[in-house]
Amino acid sequence: MAHSCLIFCILALQYKSTICVQLMQVHQTPKELILSPGSSLKVSCSVNDTDYPNLYWYQWTPAAGFTLAFTSLSVGSVDPSSKGPFKSQRPEKLQIDLESDAVSESDSAVWYCAASLHSIPD
């Protein structure tokens, strides 16, 4: 019997502000995941100490390319709070999480966490 799996590559983006000339370091845990269909998913993204960064999750698929999936401008606020089987929350000033209760093969994607001191237009 063939065994199928999902591959989630979790990569970090670093944003260098041209105004503040400050490099934020983005850390994701875990950095990559290989999951079976039906498995749950939780990835945490944190940035180094900085003043209230905006945090983002981007999703990349071959069909759609890069799409902005989640935006958080403050603790406890993520827009949208869910997208398909995925949800995001921001429990702390410097952390945003990506979660799913059960992933499927059609959910395979590369997810990128990004941080910015300024808003990124839609």
Image (cartoon, rainbow, N blue to C red):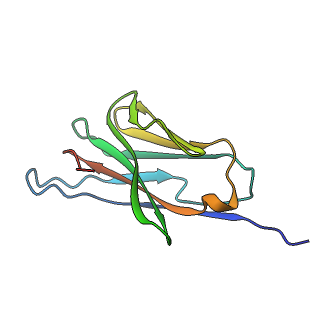
Residue 26's place in the image compared with 119, above or below, is: below
Extreme residue in the right direction: 1
Tell me where residue 12 appears, x and y as whole percent. 40, 59
Q: Quadrant of the N terminus?
A: bottom right
Residue 101's place in the image compared with 26, above or below, is: above
**For the point 64% across and 61% down, which residue is it?**
106
Tell me where residue 66 appears, x and y as whole percent. 40, 63
Tell me where residue 30 appears, x and y as whole percent. 55, 54
Extreme residue in the top direction: 76
Tell me where residue 121 appears, x and y as whole percent. 23, 50
Q: Does residue 109 appear anywhere in the picture?
A: yes
Front residue (pair 47, 5): 5
**For the point 82% across and 68% down, which residue is it?**
3
Q: Does residue 9 appear anywhere in the picture?
A: no
The number of numbered discs placed on residues in the rendered structure image is 0
**For the point 7% across and 52% down, which residue is it?**
19
Residue 92: quadrant of the picture: top left
Report the side of 58 relative to 107 (left or right): left
**For the point 77% across and 67% down, which residue is it?**
4
Front residue (pair 19, 2): 2
Residue 49's place in the image compared with 108, above or below, is: above
Extreme residue in the left direction: 19
Report the side of 5 relative to 69 (left or right): right
